[in-house]
């Protein structure tokens, strides 16, 4: 069995592992660069751009997953740190709410700044902002008790203009982001490194996580970590295939993936090795079909010598199959 505490500590020290807390549509991400100055804490790390701390991992179920991307040769992966539906639930406030000084902030200098819950009503995250800016504080306090989405509420515009810290709180800990909010002031893109996304269209779906991530029923992700991808940099750019990264995540899949995922991958590789016809395997569920397609993409990336690999890909990994099984409104980066 995996030693979760040790595994988390190892990945916190790895600059090519990304992290996130949030829901489907409201997410805070923590990333760090090679050699970036950081302060470590017990299961936590803080840089000048943001930070992460895991406070409670004793009752966590880690689930490794893999999923296809729209690009026909790529796949994403991650480990969801889950709790049960009831154990994961946070405050679910529906209006902007002042919470007082953030005395639990990662950095001492931020503990007198005022924390506000944005009132996004998400099951497993209280998505907050933190500020000591007098002008922003006055607007937020005048708007407290109202939904940020009200047409005449000035609070959201003030938040986007002032770029306060964002703080995502879950039952496992917190992610803090100190960088600017992606928008007009950043050229319309999120800055590299720690950043946040609040996407109203996705929030309206009411999901705890992307439908492209297959988790056991009743399990809710309170945090994710994303080990190095064999084909993509942390910024999502292509790189030469990295067999070390592939082997490292294979080890996590072997221990932490769902039985359906592991079994489908094993059956696919066995069928390829035996030279069986592509229609000899017909996975029944969406999750199993995704596992099969991921396995085929990985076999191609590894340069495997399976004689019928191209035929299997043509049969099982068509654009139509991907469109049928993937949610159209899922950002490519949510879950790397």
Image: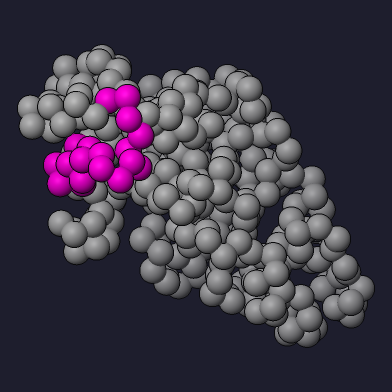
Residue 163 painted magenta: yes
The overriding secondary structure of the stretch rendered in magenta is loop
Instruction: Give the vertical position of 140 relative to 250 (above or below).
Output: above
Residue 224 painted magenta: no
Q: Residue 244 placed where, x, y %?
A: 52, 58
Specify whether residue 210 is in view: yes
When asked about the image quadrant of residue 40, the answer is top left
The residue at the point 25 percent across, 15 percent down is 100
Horizontal relation, residue 59 to residue 269: left or right: left
Horizontal relation, residue 1 to residue 138: left or right: right
In the depicted view, which residue is nearer to us: 58 or 195? 195
In the depicted view, which residue is nearer to us: 46 or 171? 171
Specify whether residue 227 is in view: no
Q: Residue 231 placed where, x, y %?
A: 49, 67
Query: What residue range appears in magenta?
Result: 144-164
In the depicted view, which residue is nearer to us: 279 or 228? 279
The residue at the point 74 percent across, 84 percent down is 314
């Amino acid at each position: 069995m995996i030693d979760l505490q040790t595994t988390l500590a190892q990945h916190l020290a790895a600059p090519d592992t990304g992290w996130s807390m949030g829901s489907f549509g409201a997410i805070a991400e923590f990333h760090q660069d090679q050699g970036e100055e950081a302060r470590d804490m017990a299961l936590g790390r803080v840089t000048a751009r943001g930070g992460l701390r895991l406070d409670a991992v004793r009752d966590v179920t880690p689930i490794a997953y893999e999923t296809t991307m729209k690009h026909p040769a790529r796949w994403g992966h991650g480990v969801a740190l889950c709790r049960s539906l009831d154990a994961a639930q946070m405050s679910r406030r529906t209006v902007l709410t002042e919470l007082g000084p953030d005395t639990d902030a990662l950095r001492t200098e931020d503990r007198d700044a005022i924390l506000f819950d944005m009132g996004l009503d998400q099951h497993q995250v209280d998505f907050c902002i933190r500020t000591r800016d007098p002008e922003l504080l006055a607007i937020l306090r005048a708007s407290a008790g109202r939904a940020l989405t009200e047409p005449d509420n000035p609070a959201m515009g003030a938040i986007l203009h002032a770029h306060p810290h964002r703080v995502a709180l879950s039952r496992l800990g917190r992610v803090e982001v100190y960088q600017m909010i992606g928008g007009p002031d950043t050229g319309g893109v999120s800055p590299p490194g720690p950043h946040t996304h609040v996407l109203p269209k996705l929030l309206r779906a009411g999901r705890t996580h992307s439908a492209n991530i297959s988790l056991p029923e009743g399990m809710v992700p309170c945090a994710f970590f994303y080990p190095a991808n064999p084909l993509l940099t942390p910024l999502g750019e292509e790189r030469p295939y990295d067999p070390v990264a592939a082997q490292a995540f294979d080890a996590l899949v072997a221990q932490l993936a769902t039985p359906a995922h592991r079994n489908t991958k094993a059956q696919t590789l066995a069928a390829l090795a035996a030279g069986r016809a592509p229609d000899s395997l017909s996975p029944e569920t969406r999750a199993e079909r995704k596992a099969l397609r991921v396995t085929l993409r990985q076999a191609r990336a590894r340069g495997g010598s399976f004689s019928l690999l191209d035929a299997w890909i043509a049969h099982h990994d068509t654009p139509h199959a991907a469109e049928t099984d993937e949610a159209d409104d899922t950002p490519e980066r949510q879950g790397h």
